[in-house]
Image (tube, rainbow, N blue to C red):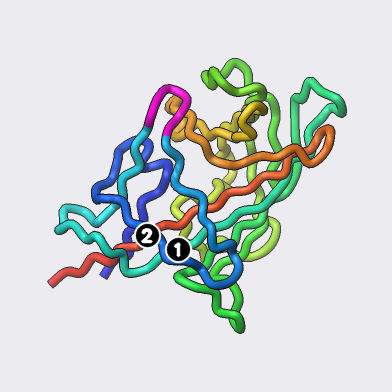
Amino acid sequence: MRAVVCSSAVAALMGCTSAPVMPPDVPTDPPTTQTPLPTGGTSGPTDFPLDTGFGGPSDQEPDHWLHVDEVGYWNLGPSGGPWDSFAGEITLTEILDELDTEEGPDCLVTYSWSGVALTPHSCTVCDDVFQVTFIEVSGDSSSCTNPDLPPTMTGNVWHLGYESSTGTIYQNVGFTGVWVPWYTANEGGPDRLDVTYSRSWPIYVETTE
């Protein structure tokens, strides 16, 4: 038996198969309204069909739903801009199907993240682009099943770009030049962005005889 989850990054590059299905409501934290999967990168529409397994029959009803929420911030510098760096933290919460009020979330981990200005870059809509390093500072990411966990191994980074007009942070998926909407960013002050991410992943179970 194998659980199959299709990540935004993988779907953006390869695609997965199935007709879209809607997640059930989560009765308690995180919020019951989930942000849909991103619909495109900066170079045009990108489809995110759902994964139903590897070569198996189509399964329109997932066995479980993984609800992922991330809340964090960027403190940008220098004060007043133009910005060439940031530092902050982001906390990731995972809930499988619904919250266990006694045990808490299935995964709860906090990362520090820091960015340095990246030039040149290929994000045509971004005002600022950073090379971002993540460090796990609390919790245990090994308990998480989110297919798009931040990279924390030495030398692993993301490229993230901020577009102020829409309050969107894009990720350069796999360093391919395909920039996909990743986080929502709201100005929390003159040199601060409050960053959020919310997804519901369908989880399909593949069985073998």
- Whether residue 4 sits left or right of residue 174 in the image: it is left
Task: Say if 28 sits above or below 11 in the image.
Answer: below
Task: Say if 30 sits above or below 34 in the image.
Answer: below
Contact between labelled residues 1 and 2, with CB atoms less than 8 Å apart = yes
Where's the C terminus, which quadrant?
bottom left
Q: Is residue 138 magenta?
A: no
Name of the residue lying farthest toward the right: 79
Question: Which residue is the site of mark 1?
Answer: 66
Residue 142, percent across and down? 52, 63
**Three-letter amino acid code of the residue under disc 1:** Leu
* SS under mark 1: strand
- Whether residue 8 sits left or right of residue 79 in the image: it is left
Q: CA distance from mark 2 to mark 1?
A: 6 Å
Please tell me which residue is depicted at 38% across the width and 29% down the height of the picture: 45
Q: Residues within 10 Å of mark 2 (few under 14, many from 20)?
A: many
> Which residues are the magenta region?
40-45
- Say the numbered circle drawn on residue 202: 2
* SS under mark 2: strand
Please tell me which residue is depicted at 60% across the width and 23% down the height of the picture: 126
Please tell me which residue is depicted at 16% across the width and 69% down the height of the picture: 208
Task: Say if 124 sits above or below 195 in the image.
Answer: above
**Three-letter amino acid code of the residue under disc 2:** Pro
